[in-house]
Image: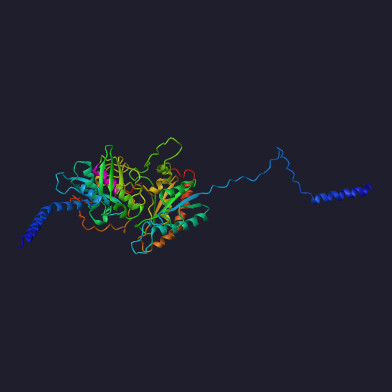
Amino acid sequence: MSRAARITILLLVLAVLAGLLELPALRTQLLQFGREEQSEEEARREVIRPVPEGHEAPKENVNIFWLSADDPEQLAAVNTRLALGKEPQERARVALETLITGAPTPEQRVLPLETSLLAFYLLPNGTAVADFSDALSHELPSGIASEQLALDAITQTLHAAVPQVGRLRILIDGQEAETLAGHVDLSGAFDLSQMTPGAAGPAAPASAQTGAPGAAPGTPPGAAPAPPPAPGRPANAPGAQGQSKPAATKPPRRE
Amino acid sequence: MAAGACAALAALLAAAQSTAPQQTLPPPAPSPSTPVELPPIVPPAPAITVILDPAHGGADQGAHSEASEEGAVEKDLVLTIALAMRRELERQGIRVILTRQTDVDMAINDRAAVANAAGAGFFVTLHIGSSGAPNTAQAYSFGTPHGGAPPAFVPRPIGIDAVRWNDAQSGYQISSRRFAELLQVELAQRLPPSADIPQFAEVRQLRVVAHPAVAIELSSVAEEDPAALSKTAGPLAAALVRAIAAFRQPGGGRP
């Protein structure tokens, strides 16, 4: 082998060695680039991902408002054992995630399963801002009744889990929206301060444990099937197990 | 000679009477002792105005039948019903204004602008839900279900004699509720098994209207033959006429 050939081989070996040394750094950069490709929404979802089951927060009973098993035109409170935590943001997130994904039966779902709670803030003045993904608008059955039911489920569940929320502003995909899905007004904030805990409102009896929500008009019987479970989503929300039976009494229709 | 002159004068007078324009003399002033019977002056009754709002339109189809690709859609059905209702109402001497007469997508505020420019009247926005007992109708007036009858919002003074656009309904909530109650009673009779009492809902379209205003949601596009809903136009128009008549009775508009 000539001297020139040996030098060439040596140089090639050196180049390969240098490449091998650089490879981990390149791999790290590639992974980082991939992460930056994540959508803003995905990033937000990661931030607010539900706290896994079994974290330190003790479980407590809270009313979650789904469609009544007896009358799909009404909401019914289901006393549910959840690890809500102490912080209002955490409590709201666990309760609302449970409302979306943890209904006892698919027929009792009141919000589309595809919905995500993208963010939740509580301002010092008691006004809360809940930012839902646009599935809440697009996947909800169209109509005044179904939209009002969805809104009532959100406000009543939130009020039961986080009583210090005085007013609620709902955003869709980070934006102010004129309506929820074409009918119900989202342009202002909803006053939760007049609601009695876990019940419908001032006019409702104070038997909060049975729910007695404000009895929205709603999705009448026989139709508007709940959306099928989305693949990849957990069948139950965190802590959804341990639910008691739905409130036996049918909530009164609101005047 | 004198006889000839007299004859000529008589002929001249006769000719003058036949050709001269008739002069009307003012009627003699009535003497105080004999009063003249004049026909009673009946002012024309002010026409009742109904502003009918067929919801959705254009790209906004509203609720649609899941049964088939070519199933009925809410925007077409409500327009058909509203046009038929207009014929019925006009036959009863009611002035009808439609917010849209063709398949166009109108913004909620544009519809309200048509209504608010119409002078005194009754506003009815027509919807069809995606579920519910077939051929029933539910009336809604603006209001939060949690607050019940108390106003959901309080007009904020802005220093001049005007009302904020978003507060347009604030002065009409009680009369809208009364109108909805009267209307729902009629709907229950004509379209059984519709409910006896109206509901509150935070319908954006009602919030920005400065009239006694209700939303009517018919059920539903999920029926086997949604086009049959167009037959509800007659009962709807009859219910409206009766409700308006009851509302205009002395004390009828008061709760």
Image position of B5 (left or right of B141): right
Coloring scheme used: rainbow
Image position of B7 (left or right of B121): right
**Residue A78 seen in render:** no
Query: What is the x, y in percent for residue B231?
Result: 44, 60
Query: What is the x, y in percent for residue A150?
Result: 30, 50
What is the total number of numbered labels drawn onto the structure image? 0
Image position of B16 (left or right of A68): right
Rendering quarter of residue B164:
top left
Which residues, given as a range, are shown in magenta? A152-162
Residue at image point 80% right, 51% down: B18
Q: Residue at the front extreme?
A: A3
**Residue B47 seen in render:** yes
Which residue is more in the foreground, B187 or A82?
A82
Query: What is the x, y in percent for residue A2?
Result: 5, 62
Query: What is the x, y in percent for residue A79?
Result: 22, 48
Dominant SS of magenta comes to: helix
Which residue is more in the foreground, B238 or B215?
B215
**Residue B195 on the magenta segment:** no
Which residue is more in the foreground, A103 or A12?
A12
Q: Residue at the left extreme?
A: A1
